[in-house]
């Protein structure tokens, strides 16, 4: 089988399964795992997929349609849970933090510390509803027009955020890369998160492996404005090394 034929079959597998593993492909095509890795590298260079440590995932579009709430507000993936567990270790007694309405933020709620008192600012009605049951957390919700996909991100919300000062902002987005910084699906969401970053003493980005090296439609902030990136064990080593060269502290959540 020629490399072009094998790569076409790899594309078909990826489209059908949503994720592929190099070891399984090597066994299926009866070639060495190094051959499959070269195929995946070539396909990534041609913009056909995004490599991970063990294989590859589809290349994300720069815009993303709204996620079904049953997926957004779920138990989360093993990668999201690992990142969330590590992130909450940076919440200190007396802190005021920002938590948005992304799926990783919802997962974060499971691991919020109960042995200290702190304040949470959120622009998500779902997150605020969950937080009202925590006796050790004071919760403030951003005011403005309610928008289910990205929470409250309109001009009124931006003006409200500008009146605050936060200790730590836990931001996320569709992608994070050296070239395009942290980015989001919409300009409205990007502008709101940029404003949150401007009023925060520390900015922590929560990004699973499939977001690292990915570029979405609207830039939120430059990497130089980021204090820390928390990702997981499958994040691409090359992109992580380039991010660290810009002075961003990168923490890798370990596989459970």
Image: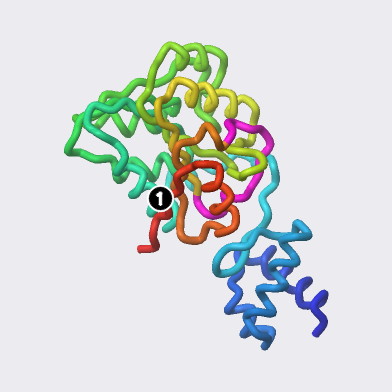
> Which quarter of the picture shows residue 37?
bottom right
Q: Is residue 149 left or right of residue 101?
A: right
What residue lies at 39% left-to-right and 45% top-to-bottom?
A: 107
Residue 103 in view: no
Task: Please check the rendered image and state whether residue 68 is part of the magenta-colored stretch, yes or no.
Answer: no
From this viewpoint, which residue is outermost toward the left?
A: 115
Specify start and end residues of the magenta stretch as a single range: 208-222
Rendered-image quadrant of the N terminus? bottom right
Q: Is residue 154 left or right of residue 63?
A: left
Residue 227 in view: yes
> Which quarter of the picture shows residue 115?
top left
Camera-nearest residue between 130 and 210: 210
User: Circle 1 sits in a helix, a strand or a loop, which is it?
Assistant: helix
Count of labels in the image: 1
Rendered-image quadrant of the C terminus? bottom left
Q: Position of residue 129 (x, y in %)?
A: 34, 29
What residue lies at 62% left-to-right and 80% top-to-bottom?
A: 33
Q: Position of residue 231 (x, y in %)?
A: 46, 51
What residue lies at 56% left-to-right and 18% top-to-bottom?
A: 154
Count residues near mark 1 (Cα–Cα under 10 Å), then give few for <14, some for 14-19, many for 20+: many
Q: Position of residue 191 (x, y in %)?
A: 59, 24
Residue located beneath label 1 in the image = 83
Task: Please check the rendered image and state whether residue 209 is part of the magenta-colored stretch, yes or no.
Answer: yes
């Amino acid at each position: 089988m020629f490399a072009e034929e094998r790569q076409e079959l790899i594309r078909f597998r990826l489209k059908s399964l949503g994720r592929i593993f190099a070891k399984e492909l090597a066994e299926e095509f009866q070639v060495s795992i190094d051959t499959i890795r070269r195929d995946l590298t070539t396909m990534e260079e041609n913009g056909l997929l995004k490599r991970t440590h063990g294989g590859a995932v589809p290349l994300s579009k720069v815009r993303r349609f709204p996620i079904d709430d049953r997926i957004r507000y779920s138990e989360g993936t093993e990668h999201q849970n690992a990142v969330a567990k590590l992130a909450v270790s940076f919440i200190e007694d007396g802190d005021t933090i920002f938590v948005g309405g992304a799926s990783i933020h919802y997962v974060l709620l499971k691991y919020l510390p109960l042995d200290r008192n702190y304040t949470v600012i959120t622009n998500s009605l779902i997150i605020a509803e969950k937080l009202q049951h925590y006796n050790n957390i004071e919760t403030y919700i951003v005011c403005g027009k309610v928008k289910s996909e990205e929470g409250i991100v309109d001009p009124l919300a931006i003006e409200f955020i500008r009146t605050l000062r936060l200790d730590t902002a836990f931001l996320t987005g569709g992608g994070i890369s050296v070239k395009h910084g942290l980015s989001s699906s919409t300009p409205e969401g990007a502008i709101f998160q940029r404003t949150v970053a401007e009023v925060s003493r520390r900015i922590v980005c929560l990004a699973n492996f499939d977001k690292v090296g990915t570029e979405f439609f609207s830039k939120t902030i430059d990497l130089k404005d980021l204090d820390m990136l928390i990702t997981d064990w499958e994040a691409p080593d090359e992109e992580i090394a380039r991010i660290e060269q810009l002075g961003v502290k990168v923490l890798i959540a370990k596989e459970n």
